[in-house]
Image (tube, rainbow, N blue to C red):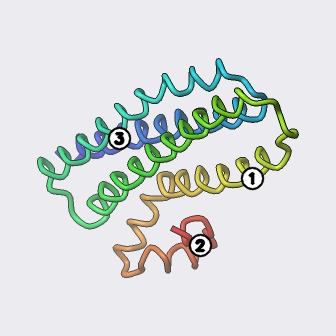
Amino acid sequence: MERIFDEELKALKGRILALGGLVEEQVQRSIKALVERDSDLARGTIEEDHRVNRMEVEIDEECVRLIALRQPAAGDLRFLTTAMKIVTDLERMGDLAVDTCERALELNEEPPLKPYIDIPRMADAAQRNDIEAARALLKQGADVNAAQADGMTALHWAAVNDNVELAKM
C-alpha cells in the first residue's frame, strides 16, 4: 500500500513540475508580449490561462484526496500541504502574467515611449529565484523528510546542507 502511495506522490510531483513549467512559459510569454509589443502573443497567453487554472484545481483536489484516503504522517503530510500552497502560488503567478498581458494590450494602443530594457532582466531574476526554490523543494523533499526524522527542522537541514533557496522558503 505504501508503494502505491509513493507512486501517487511521485505522479503528483510530476504534475506540480508540469504546472510550474506552464506558468514559467506563461510568464516568459507575457514579458515578451510586453517588451516586443506583440498583441497576438498577449491574447494567446490570456486565452491559455484556463489550463493553469484547471491544473491548479486538479492538483489541489488530488492533494485533498491523498490526505483523506492515505492519512499521511509527518513528512508526507507536510509535502502535501506545501504542494497545495505551491500550486496556489503558481496559479497566482499565472494570473499576474495575464495581468501583464492585459496591460501590454492597453499599452499597445498608444505609441511606444521607449524600449523596455530593464523589465526582461528583472523578470529573469525573479523567475529564476522562484523556479529554483520550487525545484529545490520538490527534488530535495525526500532528503528533508529523512533529516526531519532525525530531529532536524527543515530550516536546520537547509542550513547544514547549504541550501539557501530552501532556507528562504
- Residue 34 picture quarter: top right
The residue tagged with tag 1: helix, strand or loop?
A: helix
Which mark's residue is nearer the viewer, 2 or 3? 3
Q: Amino acid at mark 2?
A: Asn
Q: Amino acid at mark 1?
A: Met
Residue depicted at 64% across the width and 32% down the height: 106
- Residues marked 1 and 3 touching at CB (< 8 Å): no
| Residue at the disc numbered 1 | 122
Q: CA distance from mark 1 to mark 2?
A: 28 Å
Which mark's residue is nearer the viewer, 1 or 2? 1
Q: Nearer the viewer, residue 47 or 114?
A: 114
| Residue at the disc numbered 3 | 12
Q: Nearer the viewer, residue 92 or 130?
A: 92
- Residue 11 picture quarter: top left
Q: Quadrant of the N terminus?
A: top left
- Horizontally, residue 136 falls left or right of residue 117, namely left
Which mark's residue is nearer the viewer, 1 or 3? 1
* Residue 94 circle label: none
Measured along the vertical axis of the image, is residue 48 above or below residue 166?
A: above
